[in-house]
Image (tube, helix red, strand yellow):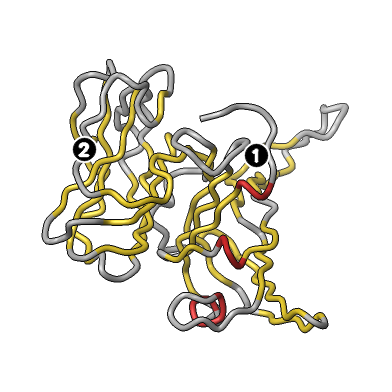
Amino acid sequence: MATGRTHLKHSRVYIDGYDMSGYTRTFGPLSTEWEEGDATVLTDEIKNVMLNKPNITCSAFNGVFDTTAASGLHPVMNTSGTKRTVMHFLGIRGVPAAGDPAFCGQWLQNGYHPEVNDPVVYVSIPWGQWAYDAGSLAYGKAWGHVLHAKGAETAANTTTGGGGDIDNGAQTTAGGIFVYQVFSGDGTATLSVDDSADDSIYSALSGATSGELDCSSPQHGMVALGTSATVRRYLRWQLSLNTATTVTFAGAFIRG
C-alpha cells in the first residue's frame, strides 16, 4: 500500500460480481452526510443542532454504453430499482492493493439513462440511499480498506509476518463488515477473513464468512459482525476451496 495523492485512473469499480472499471468514466461523490435536528432553545444565543443518522451514498455512476453479452454495462445494469453491492477501490499511485481505501455498500440503483453524445453513447446511473435490506443497517460507515485486490487464488492464504493485508495498528471492539465480490471460478468455495494479534498466529474471524458460493457465476455480498465484536489488529483474506480449483475475487473490510 502506497500513501499520498492519487489519480482516478487507479480506481476500480465492482458491482454485483462484475468488473465495471472498463466501462466507467466517473463516479461519486462518495458521500456520508449526517441529518441535522435543530436543538436550539430560548436561552441559546446561536442556533445549534444534534446529528441524526447518516445518509451514505455513492451518488452517480457515469459510463460508456456497451452491449457485450453477460458482462457489458447495458446487459448488467439496465434494470433499475435493484439493490446492488458496490465496491469502489481507490488505488494509491497504482492499481488497488491490500490496505488501500475502499468505499463499499449496498445501494438501490434508481435509474438507467443512456445519453447520446455524438459520436459516443454514455450511460448515467443514479444511486439512492442505503438499501433497507442491505447486509448491515447497524453501521453508519462505508469506508474501509481493500482486503484482497481483484485477482485469482488457487490455495488458502498462509501468509504471516508481512503486516497482514490490513494492519490497523491496534485491535477494535466495534465489529465490522466483510464485503466480497466473486467474478469467476470453476466450482464452489468459501471466502472469509482471518485476524491476528501478532501477524504470526491467525484464526478465523468469527462470522466474517461468505458461506459456500458457486463461483462459476458472479457472486457478491456484505456480512456484518455484531457491533461489539472484537477484531484483532491484523487482517488477511482467506479462501477455502471446495470443488473449485481457482477463484477470482475481491474483498474489503470495514471496521466498526
What residue is shown with label 2?
206
**Amino acid tagged 2:** Ser
For mark 1, does the 10 Å Cα neighbourhood hold few (<14), some (14 to 19), or many (20 or more) residues? few
> 36 or 56: which is nearer to us?
56
User: Which residue corresponds to the image point at 86% horizontal and 30% vertical from the top-left?
Assistant: 46
**Amino acid tagged 1:** Leu
User: Which residue corresponds to the image point at 47% horizontal and 69% vertical from the top-left?
Assistant: 83
> 72 or 134: which is nearer to us?
72
From what the image shows, is residue 130 above or below residue 193?
Answer: below
> 29 or 226: which is nearer to us?
29
User: Which residue corresponds to the image point at 60% horizontal and 36% vertical from the top-left?
Assistant: 92
Which residue of the protein is positioned furthest toward the left in this rendering? Answer: 243
Q: Is residue 103 visible?
A: yes
Q: Tell me the element at label 1.
A: strand
Q: Locate residue 16, reporting x and y percent.
A: 43, 65
Are the residues tagged 2 and 1 within 8 Å (C-beta)? no
Quarter in which the C terminus is drawn: top left
Badge number at residue 51 = 1
Q: Tell me the element at label 2.
A: strand
